[in-house]
Image: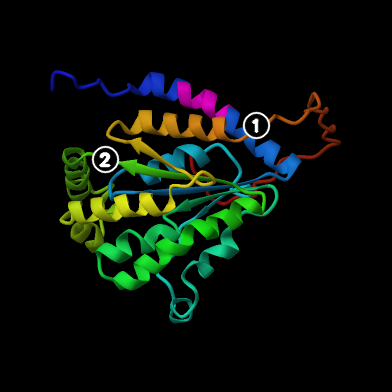
Amino acid sequence: MKKNAVEPLGRKPYERKLRDLHGELVKLQEWAKHAGGKVCIVFEGRDGAGKGGVIKAITERVSPRVFRVVALPPPTERERSQMYVQRYLPHLPAAGEIVIFDRSWYNRAGVERVMGFCTEEQAKSFLQVVAGVERAIVDSGAILLKYWLEVGPEEQTRRMEERINDPRKIWKLSPMDLKSYSRWYDYSRARDEMFRASDTTWAPWYAVHSDDKRQARLNIISHILNSVPYEAPPREKIKLPKRQKSEGYEEADFARNWIG
């Protein structure tokens, strides 16, 4: 271990802290439903930086009807003919919704630019207009939070090799990931230019070191909770009612086969 290395957060303290944060996320959910709040959360970052794990940690104890995860497939022919951000706009939150983008319109500034799926002119045109688009999103009453997950090169290598060798994780590895892996500094330059163009006062970027995945998850969830002025709505005390009497009902053998 390196001299100044920090010991990764253990599972038990992580789960204990995450449990408390999950309770607050439920309060955030109930606030959104009660007050008509709109929250839009964007996750970007390098391949293997842990975006999926963060999103799973956020959503595993809340309602998918309120916390919607958007991970769009490649654009159709029709969508490729539209204004670039157009296909993302229908997915923005309405009142009472918290929308999480697992990659977003920033694909144009990152993977599309680095991998040659768009021209330099298209990428630069996007960077010129994106701040204005996000201004319109914020002016519509939405809270917009943008997170960039940054993983170190050694840790990224370890995670990629794990995906190759672990049969439970091979689905996470695509040919595009392998091509992206070799272009570390191209992604660094694209990230830096993206930050310069779109790190604004109304929609700033928040960078998160994610070599310690558990700590990164806790840090992001805590930051989300601190960034939204939510309050748990009033809740009536709940008491289970008595069940009705059987009135002679006998349990039927309604299933031919039982498991367990």
Q: CA distance from mark 1 to mark 2?
A: 31 Å
Residue type at mark 1? Lys
Q: State the predominant SS element of the stretch in magenta.
A: helix
Q: Residues within 10 Å of mark 2 (few under 14, many from 20)?
A: many
Residue at 26%, 70% (x, y): give it: 116
Of callouts 1 and 2, the N-terminal one? 1
Q: Nearer the viewer, mark 1 or mark 2?
A: 2
The magenta segment is 17-23
Hey, which quadrant is residue 62 in on the image? top right
Residue at 28%, 50% (x, y): give it: 47
Can residue 234 be seen in the rendering of this structure? yes
Q: Is residue 137 magenta?
A: no
Name above or below for residue 176 compared with residue 247: below
Name above or below for residue 120 compared with residue 204: below
Callout 2 secondary element: loop
Name above or below for residue 214 compared with residue 87: above
* Viewport quadrant of the N terminus: top left
Hey, which quadrant is residue 121 in on the image? bottom left
- Disc 1 target residue: 27
Tell me residue 4's x, y (percent). 18, 19
- In this picture, residue 70 sits left or right of residue 187: right
Residue at 29%, 49% (x, y): give it: 46
Tell me residue 114's x, y (percent). 25, 62
- Disc 2 target residue: 151
- In this picture, residue 19 sits left or right of residue 125: right
Q: Residue 156: which disc? A: none
